[in-house]
Amino acid sequence: MVVSSESSDATPASDNVFALFEAAASAHRDRPFLISNGKPLLDYAAMLEETGRAAAWLHAIGVTPGDRVVVQAHKSPAAVILYLACLRAGAVFIPLNTAYQRSELSYFLSDAEPRLLVASAGLPGAAVAFEGARIELAETIEAAPWVDVTATIPVVQRSAADAAAILYTSGTTGRSKGAVLTHGNLSSNVIVLGQAWRWRDDDVLLHALPIFHAHGLFVALHCALLYASPILFHERFDAAAVLRDFRSATVFMGVPTFYTRLLAEPAFTRELCARMRLFVSGSAPLLDATFAEFVERAGHSILERYGMTEALMITSNPYDGPRVAGSVGPPLPGISVRIVTEDGKPAAVGQPGVLELKGPNLFTGYWRNPEKTAQDHTADGYFISGDIATRDEAGFIRIVGRAKDLIISGGYNVYPKEVEMTIDAIEGVAESAVIGVPHPDFGEGVVAVVARAAGATLAVDDITAAVTVQLAAFKRPKASIIVDELPRNAMGKVQKAELRDKYKDLFIRRSA
Ligand code: MCA
Ligand code: AMP
């Protein structure tokens, strides 16, 4: 396909976050961009050319600036190019977890109403795309339809307030909401992170996170792009494969499960990490034991930071100076964080309260959901995170609990309400309570405690069969327990705390 550059309304790049990446890449055109198994796949010059052609393709097929593009695709160089092309073309990128099942996907598509859907062949997205669903345009990522395009387009002008991406994140209602993130959010956060983590010109990033969440996409990938750093590209986290690349890398980012899995590898040694300068952890709490064992084995303190989809990265332990186990560090520069007690007062040092924040990192709101947006903000514009935190004398923050009913399993969010709704619809179920309990690999493991309806027969297999069809694998209970009734307090509220305590050893063997 030949696409004329006249087809674009492109003007100078302005606040488009891609302009930052373009500037870095233009200064380092010969530098490898993506490297897989020791082989350079693309250099930064090729990144610029391919994203230019892919952006031209997007415009040629009718994706105009501001249009939404939903992508359910396996992690691959093509998926990275497509993401960057969306930025470059001014389209709004909406990545979806590859584990989402068909029924989950239908909701996202009807809510997002994308102009274009791109999916990996074999994933539910591809099936839905080609069934004539209400989507104007659909493609498989394997087709990489831009490879035949000969024209390219310059970076489309966007203002800092224009949407760059929508990331779905579940709510307490069990229904996901799209967090609208702007070019300004993405730019400000990556600039702050690059400075806070002392990104260097000779850094090499080992990237093994999925690219459908903020951690892999906006934290890891963007930091490398801002400095045109080579990326050792892993399509998924496999501890043995990651270990083989440590000698060539300087920076690694992961969820706590990555670190516990690395520590379980006998081949993981201090010598292997000799060139590494930074290990970052986030998305879920890092256990003190993991932090301490890592110091022992790798000779490095993991730098823990805290963030969320709606606000990207919020706090970080210092690069220089002590990194405190169990703390997520002080707020990043330019971000205001306050901790508010139940009676609405500022929390004293050490006193727990809900963490609220404000800054250039904060999203503009939930997609087509002004009520929820208003509900989650205070009158003075702070976002109510739903995390319970404390702050010490030195300003270091600890995340000590959650006001929201949320389970974080291996870095993925599981909303109990969504799993409960699926289980409650099964014949023979009176009601269910879905909880998270300590899990040696995933941090928290999903457990369903299910009350059988009076006189009904119900087997664990019935629950497994229903959740297997309807829910992504990471949301499915790792254990289901059938009981006669759920514990309730005097107000009739199900006592999840009691259940968490009762089943706390389900996955973990504790020494007496
Ligand atoms: C896979 N499974 C899981 C999970 N991942 N179950 C629970 N929790 C999970 N996280 C399922 C698989 O589908 C499979 O199910 C079974 O567990 C075993 O799979 P396994 O091969 O062990 O899993 P894996 O493919 O190795 O994946 C584990 C993983 C992955 C590498 C830890 O979950 C992962 O990459 N997590 C990173 C998540 C992340 O990037 N989060 C950032 C969110 P079955 O046996 O039924 O087939 S962004 C965010 O939170 C904010 C902004 C922040 O602060 O960063
Ligand atoms: P998400 O909705 O996927 O963006 O997940 C954001 C949530 O992950 C936050 O609200 C926290 O509950 C949790 N989180 C992220 N980083 C950390 C961390 N370092 N320690 C504890 N919880 C974290």
Image (cartoon, rainbow, N blue to C red):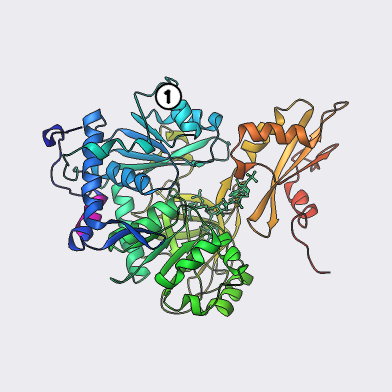
Residue located beneath label 1 in the image: 130
Residue 115 visible in the displayed image: yes
Query: Which of the two residues, 119 or 296, is positioned nearer the viewer here?
Result: 119
Quarter-of-image position of residue 189: bottom left
Q: What residue type is labelled 1?
A: Phe
Question: In the rendering, at what x and y percent does residue 450 appear?
Answer: 77, 37
Lateral position of residue 24 relative to residue 380, left or right: left
Judge whether 452 appears above or below 244 on screen.
above
Quarter of the image that includes the N terminus: top left
Who's the residue at 38% across and 50% down the image?
A: 362
Q: Main secondary structure of the magenta part?
A: helix
Query: Which of the two residues, 339 or 221, is positioned nearer the viewer here?
Result: 221
**Range drawn in magenta:** 18-23
Lateral position of residue 190 relative to residue 305, left or right: left
Who's the residue at 18% across and 58% down the image?
A: 26
**Residue 20 colored magenta?**
yes
Mark 1: which secondary structure? loop
Quarter of the image that includes the C terminus: bottom right
Lateral position of residue 403 relative to residue 27, left or right: right
Question: In the rendering, at what x and y percent does residue 160 appear?
Answer: 25, 48
